[in-house]
Image (spheres, rainbow, N blue to C red):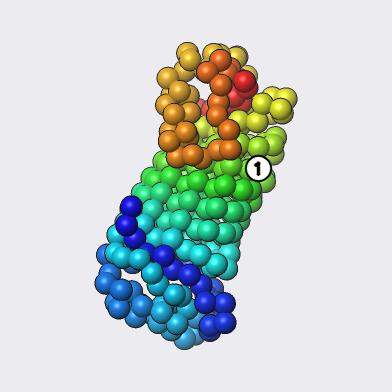
Amino acid sequence: MSGYTLTWKPHGPPALADGAALRPDVLGALAPDALRAVALKVGRDSVPLGDLFDVSGESGPTLTLRGVPPLPRMGAKMVSGELIIEGNTGDDLGASMRGGVIRVRGRAGHRVGGPDYTSDRGMTGGEIVVSGDAGDYAGLRMRRGLIAIGGAAARSPGFRMLAGTVVVARGALDSPGLEMQRGTVVALDSSVTPARHAWFQCEGEFPLTSMPAALLLVRRLAELKATNGSVAANAVVNLSSGDRFGLGKGELWQIRS
């Protein structure tokens, strides 16, 4: 898929404080000279994008970032296209995004897919794939979409989520789905004993093949190459509902091979 690659100039001006401007749906349609001329905020000043990045490639729906510091708000409010980040990101990755795909080939900070500072809504569409670990509150107040974390997640993935899906491939979940209203939090690590949480009610264990929604999710994760392993066809799903101190309409799936 065509698109630009932006490679950070390590000896250029001071680092950006915010990565929200680096979006494929904003930059991808520009001509190369226009792209290099885009003004980016550095402190109280603005500098041309070409002073901070080497630009290669051509206009298109994909934007690849190389060597960029772990900036906050990368992909914030993104609507379409594919953003590929070859490295780690700061907090608020994909904040209030509405569409497209973000791929992080490293770690992510806190509040992946959560609300941007101008909004009380988390992501309302799109997909975020993080190869490594993620920080606290992945999927905070998300309303739609998919977050797939290839490593471990820190505190309460799915915190206050209203809808959507958060998948964690490695490790035990730390207080998942607190105050969630709807949506699904999924744990894929078969080496971890399914935990019992006071705010979830166990609904039983079911074959993966008996849950069409789970089969669709597993298929989409494979298409995105979103986790470091495949889910066995004979896997079972330990299903719980919660937060039972709230609406109780959210779900926690612990998929075991």
Residue under label 1: 152
Residue plotted at (43% across, 45% down): 127
| Count of numbered marks | 1
Identify the image quadrant of residue 21. Answer: bottom left
From this view, report whether residue 196 is shown above or below residue 96: above
From this view, report whether residue 46 is shown above or below residue 70: below
Residue plotted at (45% across, 82% down): 51
Image location of residue 180, percent across then percent down: 54, 37
From this view, report whether residue 228 is shown above or below residue 84: above
Is residue 117 shown to the viewer in this render?
no
Looking at the picture, tell me which residue is in the foreground, 196 or 105. 105
The residue most toward the bottom is 45
Q: Secondary structure at mark 1?
A: loop
Residue plotted at (58% across, 17% down): 236
Check the picture and name the quadrant holding the C terminus.
Answer: top right
Answer with left or right where residue 22 lies relative to residue 58. right
Looking at the picture, tell me which residue is in the foreground, 7 or 168. 7
Q: Residues within 10 Å of mark 1 (few under 14, many from 20)?
A: many
Image location of residue 227, percent across then percent down: 55, 38
Image location of residue 152, percent across then percent down: 65, 42
Is residue 129 shown to the viewer in this render?
yes
Amino acid type, label 1? Ala
Looking at the picture, tell me which residue is in the foreground, 66 or 214. 66
Answer with left or right where residue 124 lies relative to residue 66. left
Image location of residue 62, percent across then percent down: 36, 57
The residue most toward the front is 57
